[in-house]
Amino acid sequence: MLNVFIDIETIPNQKQGAFDAILQDVALNFKAPSDLTKEKAAADLGIMDKDEIKFTSKASMIGRWEAAMASSKSVEVAEDKYRRTALNGGYGEVFVIGLAVDDGEPETITGENEAEILAKFNQFINRIKADVPRPNIRFIGHNVEFDIRFLFHRFIVNRIKPAINLYYSQYSENFADTMQIWAGRGNRIKLAELCEILGIPSPKDGIDGSQVWDYVQAGRIEEVAEYCKKDVIATREAYNRMTFQF
């Protein structure tokens, strides 16, 4: 069976007006944090009169806080929500795919657009399938369910048929997750922490996943691709250690 080590880097929704739509929704439905107290709301509003605070209901004070803060806080909240679309295969997009077959040299797939990236992924799969039947390919990643399911969703959205089955199942021998191998089903461990435990060089020495969109916006594409490649290398080393392939 061929082991294909995989990692993807994703970016937020690239549809025109996506951020503006989120911002508008946030502004119209702006809500205070559930743990905001009346006293904290009053302080944020600059209300110092103890009697005013005392005789103003919490609901009223929170309402005043929401009205006052909606404009100043909405952009911050919307930015966070927008960035989180990078974690949802229905909205975010694949930007880089890192791959390595067994002990082979890792490679990264990039493109002018997502459809091109997905097409190149299919080309990669068809290339290795030329010598190995499809059922004998195993995808291995750290939290690999995220990567595979995200790819599956993006192929559907782009109306491109994947060259291999991407319907993830934890019971299939065609998928292996280094996070689950170490932590167990339902538990989590970050790749950087696992690498530290195993004495493997960390792939997070220059950039981490939360910075990918910032790097992309700054045009630092090669650094994002290199980061993705390092994740693939670290995942492979972790997998080999945990399966006693010293």
Image (cartoon, rainbow, N blue to C red):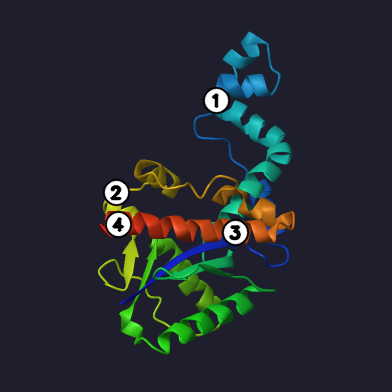
Looking at marks 1 and 4 on the same chain, the residue that comes earlier in the sequence is marked by 1
Give the labeled residue for mark 4: 246
Position of 175 relative to 235 (above/below): below
The image quarter containing residue 139 is bottom left
In whole angstroms, how far apart are the C-alphas of marks 4 and 2?
20 Å
Looking at marks 1 and 2 on the same chain, the residue that comes earlier in the sequence is marked by 1
- Residue found 41% across the figure and 68% down from its top: 103
Of 43 and 228, nearer the camera is 228
Circle nearer the viewer, 3 or 4: 4
In whole angstroms, how far apart are the C-alphas of marks 3 and 1?
51 Å
In whole angstroms, how far apart are the C-alphas of marks 3 and 4?
25 Å
Give the labeled residue for mark 2: 183
Of 86 and 239, nearer the camera is 239
**Position in image of residue 244 (x %, y %):** 25, 57
**Position in image of residue 121 (x %, y %):** 53, 78
Q: Residues within 10 Å of mark 1 (few under 14, many from 20)?
A: some
- Residue found 26% across the figure and 52% down from its top: 184
Circle nearer the viewer, 3 or 1: 3
Give the labeled residue for mark 1: 58
Give the labeled residue for mark 3: 226
